Amino acid sequence: MLKILATADIHSPRFLDLFIKSLNKVKIRPDLIILAGDLVDKNNIYALKHVYEIIIDKYGKTPIISVFGNEEYRGFEDEYRKMYPVFKWLDDEYIILEINGLKIGIIGTRGALDKPTPWQSRHMPWLYRYYQELPSKISALIDEARIKGAQYVFLVSHYGVTYKNLEGEPRNIWPYLASSRMEKIIKNKRIDLVIHGHAHNGVRDKINIDGAEVYNVSLPARREVVIIDFTPKSKVFGLEKWLHSGG
């Protein structure tokens, strides 16, 4: 079993106090920490320092995986990596970690939307094509991680990956919060665990999509950091069978 501490949407300094209070209540030592984006407000890079130091002081050498959100502005990724190097930042990338004898492939991404926001459409019109193409890219990263030896695959996205756990958010903005195409990847690739944020008002903490537990770990929604007990399941299909099935 892996104990995973996960959160998103700290928007430091906005929800920093809530984050600290919640973290102080955690009594277990996680095997893995996952931060699913929007860690700061409006690209306030220096506001992440408090979060960074608190996590490192409390958990030391625990692996910390982080993805960028829409509040960590595009073009500033290298600055975040330089200032906060203990966090392993994934930006449409994957990493394979060996934890408790398990090889875990983690794919990290900001994610995709079914519709770019009005601001994005005006200022970053190229995002429409990027969002359309990203699910295929994520699919290829999953394949590559498995070929490289990942026994289990986790997907970490800032944006939502399905409409099924957006209840609580106004229905008319769902296409601006998530990508329904990503749900198809979860089904087709048999991902083992999915973690996302962004849905501040989502009332469901998790749902199940074809055996994969999908968690919304947004701090404003959950009002606390989330502890996930991941119990590895016996794989019903090996790599060879998966490759012959067409992935």
Image (cartoon, rainbow, N blue to C red):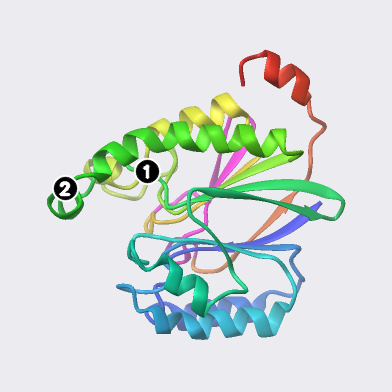
Residue toward you, 161 or 138: 138
Q: In the visual, does 174 lie left or right of 232?
A: left
Q: Is residue 17 magenta?
A: no
- Quadrant where the C terminus sits is top right
Q: Residue at x 50, y 38 (%)?
A: 138
Crowding at dot 2, Cα within 10 Å, few <14 / some 14-19 / many 20+, comes out as: few
Q: Which residues are magenta?
A: 202-222
Three-letter amino acid code at the position of disc 2: Ser
Question: How much space separates mark 2 and mark 1, taking CA atoms?
Answer: 14 Å
Q: Secondary structure at mark 1?
A: loop
Q: Is residue 167 above or below residue 87?
A: above
Q: Is residue 83 left or right of residue 115?
A: right
Residue hosting label 1: 112
Is 220 magenta? The answer is: yes
For label 2, the residue is 121
Q: Is residue 216 left or right of residue 30?
A: left
The amino acid at mark 1 is Ala
Residue at 21% in and 49% down: 117
The residue nearer to you, when weighing 49 against 175, is 49
Kindly tell me whether residue 114 is visible in this rendering: no
N-terminal-most mark, 2 or 1:
1
